[in-house]
Image (cartoon, rainbow, N blue to C red):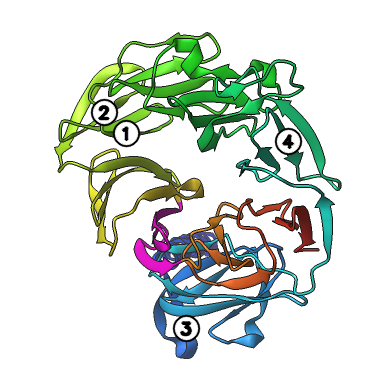
Amino acid sequence: MDLEKRARRQSLKVITSEIIMVITVIITVIVLAFLVSGYWIGSGFKVERQGMLQIHSMPTGANVAVDGDAPWFQRTNTSKVLTSGEHEVVLTKDGYDSWRKTVNISEGLLYRIQYPRLFLLEREKSVAYNNVTADFSTISPDYNLMLLANNTTTWTLLRLDRDEVKATTIDVSEIFNSVSKAEGAKEGLFTGKILSANWSSDNEHILFKVGSDKIEWVVLNVKNPLESVNITREFATDFSDVRIFDNSASNLLAIRDNNLHKIDASNRQISAIIAENIKSYDFYESDLIYFSNNKIFLGKINDEKTEILTEVEDGTRVRISKFYDEKYILMFSNHNLEIFKYENLEPIFSGEISFVPQALKIGHGGSFVFMQDGVNVAVLDMEIMAIREWQLDSINFGWLDSNMLYAVNNNKLIVYDFDGLNRRELSDNVSSHFPVAITNNKWLYYVSDNALIREIIAQ
């Protein structure tokens, strides 16, 4: 009998333990589900819906304060759960200026801020290179190379990411058609006008558009100039538009007689017509979108099949972008911007700005859409899907890095975040004729009185 009671008691313990375990698992799952959905236990044990802020800075290790809450000081490169709604975020670091922004945290969502940059207040300044002269200058996508072009056939390439700036010369006399050389002269003259210069993502090639008697397209190999390709000369034809298609500028897309072709620059080959009567187009990897005959078409670069997306008014410009793992189609028409998901054409945003943009730029990783006309700027922040309009201090502007702009106004260097916030005046006596750049996240370069100046902006 005792054995039977003991067995029943043991069975009851096992069943009770299993029930408790199941209940614990269920409660844990429910709690985790609530946490993932953004719910949190706030002050006074009140259930609140929250989101998360993830913030980085350059340099790292800046102090973070939210809503003036100094006791909560933490370092950047961290995440923090916050209640939904607006919060003021301030970054500070000893010896540096400060950075601030009001963010709107959404319930159950992650808000990422990965671009804040702080500058040393006391910056050491030195001359990195003398006798900087050029009729045209351009800087590589990684901001490590600056090309100085002049009206001679000997151009200068400066390497900026070393302790000492290194200069090499590039002879362009045999690369461009826009060259003349008098008999017996030691050096030829470059007679063309550089209309645009677009670097390849490998930072080794520049696609030049040069105006002279006719438009000339040239891919300059800055690492091995003898491997440069004069596209206009090679194919003995006029192209109205040429763009780099791959990382190394070996493959290009070109428009001839309003028809789109693919050029294999390495093998000197041009494809049959990919698309006809092109008014505007864009591509992302092998995806192609273009505007023709008042219709938007979608297809693949190496595939003859295309799909008509929609009919639009004349003058519409189209772009393809990718933000995180999602691809998007952007359509610009006069004052309007519309964004659709690439896979199913689901509309996700429609907005209007006060001016018609003449220049468009997709931010690094598709994080923003930059629209500009003169000093007027409108930026769509893809993280929050909101447009902010602002004005540059001058039409002499460029990009310090992938998220920060600069303008030179009355020889004063002014910097901003991509959305126009955190405007700061950094340096005086800065030439607006040359680009400004940050390399290695610690050096600021600009030209002053024909000298390349380096300022140390981070330790």
Give the CA distance from mark 3 to mark 4. Answer: 61 Å
Residue at label 1?
281
Q: Earlier in the sequence, mark 2 or mark 3?
A: 3
> Does residue 326 appear anywhere in the picture?
no
Q: Position of residue 230 (x, y in %)?
A: 54, 18
Amino acid, disc 2:
Ile
Quadrant containing the C terminus is: bottom right
Relative height, residue 267 to residue 373 (above, below) = above
**Picture quadrant of residue 72:** bottom right
Amino acid, disc 4:
Thr
Tell me the magenta residue range.
Answer: 367-391
**Picture quadrant of residue 145:** top right
Q: Earlier in the sequence, mark 3 or mark 4?
A: 3
Residue at label 3?
42
Q: Tell whether position 368 is magenta.
A: yes
Q: Position of residue 42 (x, y in %)?
A: 47, 83
Mark closer to the observer (3, 1):
1
Residue at 51% x, 48% y is 364
**Picture quadrant of residue 32:** bottom left
Residue at 30% x, 15% y is 273
Q: Main secondary structure of the magenta part?
A: strand
Q: Earlier in the sequence, mark 3 or mark 1?
A: 3
Residue at label 2?
278
Depth order, front residue of 211/446: 211
Q: Are marks 2 and 4 in contact (CB under 8 Å)?
A: no
| Secondary-structure class at tag 4 | strand
Give the CA distance from mark 3 to mark 1. Answer: 51 Å
